[in-house]
Amino acid sequence: MQNSMDTKEITSLFGLDFHSTLPLKEQLARKIGAFIESSPAGTLLPSERSLAEVLQVSRVTVRAALKKFFVSGRLVSCGRNGTKVAENPLAFDHLDPAVFGIPLPRVELQFLCYENMPHQQEYWQSTVARYNRLNPGRRVRINFVDSNSCPFAFEYPGGDIITVPLWVTAEQREEYFQKLPDDFSHPAEDPAFLQSLFSKDEEFAYFVPVFMQHRQLIWNRKLADICGFSSLSEEIKQRGFFGITRAAHEKLPGKYRIGGHVWDLLNFSCVPENGRFPETALEILEEIAALPSDERIFFTSQRHSFDMVENFWQGKQLYTDIIANFHAYLGNPSFPLEKDSFPLPERGKKIVWAMRVGISKHCKEPGAAADFIAFLLSDEIQSGLAERKHVLSLKNEYLKAFLRERYFSSEEALEKYCASLRFPAGKYASMLNWMRFATYDIRQEIVMVMRKQLPLEEAVKKIQEKWSKTTMQMSRRNIS
């Protein structure tokens, strides 16, 4: 539970001078520092939202002011339980450890991380600070990079530990990364972790998944009632995805939309096998062609990456399906919200995206790097992933406890769901190429089919021709 300070107390402790030449971020950082110094360990800070609203600044300013205290370990984020003053908050970067008889770090590692949104940075900074406090003989320093800059990060000789983007190929893996030490306890070989996630793949000799994300169905309870749906996920299981879409189209007033981007129907549902055009994609295209030609059903244009999520949060859309942790950072909408794990087709496996970590070829201390990765798999970190980062743990105990609390009343249903989860090991690059293809290369054909401007047979022919060219280009790149 967050600090229950009222407006007067927040203003008294953290009030800002808008006429000062000192930036608001720096003013607030000084006030927060003074609060930490005068408060015992475990004291709760007001929430980011409360600080932003009372002080009349943006949450970006609040996060920027808080950042250095998470980095130095003086504040600890405890998820829903709020942000607390840390135990023994020593800011090692500003003190000489030798004065206190604390050994200087013998090993220093650079951790290159592409999760660089503010809430992601906060999580990684506090996690790295925790590791450094527990391991005074080692120091991990985190550097945030753009995911598009990762090829250059791979070649950076100062990088030791690297978060691995989805698109990394087998050739890049062998060129830029070294295999994990022989004595490393990999989750693929540890029964404490969910074994159905892993296949016998060479990828796991190099990379370690440290948490996972899945799609989540989120729907507007008020609009679902208008449609007569008690549970959208149950309706999908009974009628099928396109069945509930047609039913909603008949019952929802004209000012409301039903779903998200039409191309997402393909890019999230298909993984090409051995370069072949997915049969599932043909089935989905047939279903799209059979729908009424109405722009309310799915978005057929895009203003920005999250326009359909924005539309949903304004109460104008029946449902959206997004990566499960994304909604946690959007705040609460004004309408009643329902969430469920995305329904699984009977014939399918539920693909989950893993955050993978690897050791760079440049790393001179692979044992120390492996120790940091092992820390990311420890009970201390895995047990708090759902609360602190809104992602899924790989460990049976914590994964099932979270799913049992949120989604499943039946142990049989829980076990069935867990058995359905998998990482597409060795296929991330192929999967990402398909997602790019479905989202950008064939968007026009998909939209024209939905608008009845292009016959299905002609659209399928054009799409398959484009896919053949794409796979040929991929093959040439791999050969070269």
Image (tube, rainbow, N blue to C red):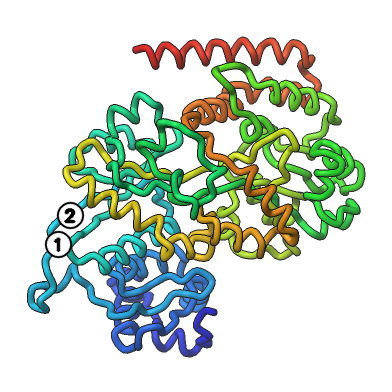
Q: Position of residue 408 (x, y in %)?
A: 71, 58
Q: Is residue 286 left or right of residue 189?
A: right
At label 2, the amino acid type is Glu
Q: Position of residue 271 (x, y in %)?
A: 60, 28
Q: Position of residue 307 (x, y in %)?
A: 62, 45
Q: Is residue 219 above or below residue 201?
A: below
At label 1, the amino acid type is Pro
Residue for point 51% across, 49% down: 212
Judge the density around disc 2: few (<14), some (14-19), many (≥20) Cα neighbours within 10 Å. Answer: some
Evaluate whether residue 312 shows in this view: no
- Disc 1 element: loop
In the image shown, does 157 or 445 lie closer to the viewer? 157
Q: Is residue 65 above or below residue 3?
A: above
Q: Which quadrant, please, contains the N terminus? A: bottom right
Residue for point 53% across, 59% down: 390
Disc 1 and disc 2: Cα gap in Å?
7 Å
Residue placed under numbered mark 1 in the picture:
105
Q: Is residue 225 left or right of residue 417?
A: right
User: Would you say the residues marked 1 and 2 are in contact, meaning their CB atoms lie under 8 Å apart?
Assistant: yes
Q: Is residue 7 left or right of residue 94?
A: right
- Disc 2 element: strand
Image quadrant assignment for residue 104? bottom left
Q: Which mark is drawn over residue 10?
A: none
Image quadrant assignment for residue 61? bottom left
Q: Is residue 151 above or below residue 135?
A: above
Residue placed under numbered mark 2 in the picture:
108
